[in-house]
């Protein structure tokens, strides 16, 4: 079946939130730049500090999950490991402010998203599938003004094959007509392919480094992997 034929049938599109529908990682990158400048390490370059921070973030995710709370822990832990000065309560407060400045930014919807969702929602079944802190992610969805385009919202702790299998089972989704749409090879594309559903890769120039991964291949006959340049290109295929 060609994609042009597929678009005539109702499909289920599981759609990622952060850096697929709305900007996210750009704000974290700015906070990290502010943190590295504040640390001003004399022995490590900015690039070396970032590598250390990446490792600390992996540890924090295991303990605290995703979101601003976990990110703030990562910055504090990284500072404590690298700073030659005693980490005072005042320094803790400063670092927490650097992390939580992200929450002060108004939500920025990626260009073309509302019009594309309006188009797709009249033809297909759309669901948000995002990982992270429930309160933070729910708030984003409410503020986005996009919620009415979706028939369901799933906020999960991790986006891995077992989670995808749970969602497929919960909604009794047919793999032949189910797609995951997102910017992350690690969380959106590869686990979707692993469980046998289709995937649409929508690259973003600021995808979080911990979400980088080589894109895998299809795992069954008839499964499809599509790459588009921008979210609005979905209108050409669905």
Image (cartoon, helix red, strand yellow):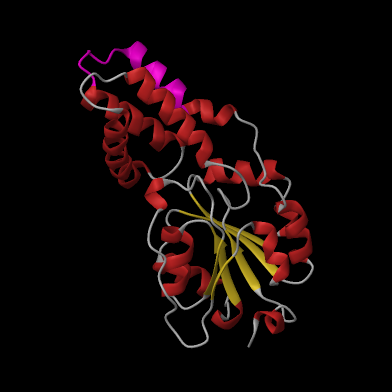
Residue 31 in picture, x, y percent from top left: 46, 28
Q: How many numbered callouts?
A: 0
Residue 109 relative to residue 99: left or right = right
| Quadrant hosting residue 48 | top left
| Quadrant hosting residue 44 | top left
Residue 118 in picture, x, y percent from top left: 78, 59
Q: In this orientation, which residue lies closer to the viewer: 153 or 187?
A: 187
Please report the residue visible at 78 percent of the width from the left and 63 percent of the height from the top.
119
Residue 171 in picture, x, y percent from top left: 58, 72
Q: In this orientation, which residue lies closer to the viewer: 84 or 97?
A: 84
Please report the residue visible at 44 percent of the width from the left and 75 percent of the height from the top.
195
Locate the N terminus and report the quarter of the image it occupies.
Answer: bottom right
Residue 178 in picture, x, y percent from top left: 59, 75
- Which secondary structure is most common in the magenta stretch? helix
Above or below 40: residue 145: below
Locate the C terminus and report the quarter of the image it occupies.
Answer: bottom right
Residue 164 relative to residue 227: left or right = left
- Please check the rendered image and state whether residue 200 is part of the magenta-colored stretch, yes or no: no
Above or below 194: residue 145: above
Residue 1 relative to residue 161: left or right = right
Above or below 158: residue 57: above
- Please check the rendered image and state whether residue 93 is part of the magenta-colored stretch, yes or no: yes
Q: Which residues are magenta?
A: 83-99
Please report the residue visible at 60 percent of the width from the left and 64 percent of the height from the top.
228
Q: In this orientation, which residue lies closer to the viewer: 117 or 166?
A: 117
């Amino acid at each position: 079946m060609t994609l042009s034929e597929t678009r005539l049938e109702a499909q289920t599109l599981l759609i990622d939130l952060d850096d697929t529908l709305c900007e996210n990682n750009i704000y974290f990158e700015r906070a990290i730049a502010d943190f590295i400048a504040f640390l001003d390490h004399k022995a490590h370059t900015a690039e070396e500090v970032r590598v250390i921070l990446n490792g600390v973030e992996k540890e924090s995710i295991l303990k605290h999950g995703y979101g601003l709370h976990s990110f703030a822990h990562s910055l504090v832990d990284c500072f404590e490991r690298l700073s030659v000065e005693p980490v005072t309560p005042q320094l803790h407060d400063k670092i927490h402010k650097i992390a939580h400045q992200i929450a002060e930014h108004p939500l920025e919807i990626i260009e073309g998203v509302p019009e594309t969702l309006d188009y797709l929602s009249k033809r297909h079944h759309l669901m948000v599938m995002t990982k992270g802190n429930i309160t933070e992610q729910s708030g984003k969805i409410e503020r986005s003004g996009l919620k009415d385009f979706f028939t369901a919202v799933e906020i999960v702790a991790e986006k891995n094959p077992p989670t995808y299998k749970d969602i497929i089972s919960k909604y009794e989704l047919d793999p032949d007509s189910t797609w995951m749409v997102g910017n992350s090879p690690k969380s959106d594309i590869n686990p979707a392919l692993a469980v046998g559903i289709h995937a649409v890769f929508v690259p973003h120039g600021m995808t979080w480094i911990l979400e980088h991964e080589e894109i895998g291949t299809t795992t069954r006959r008839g499964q499809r992997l599509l790459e588009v340049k921008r979210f609005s290109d979905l209108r050409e295929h669905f």
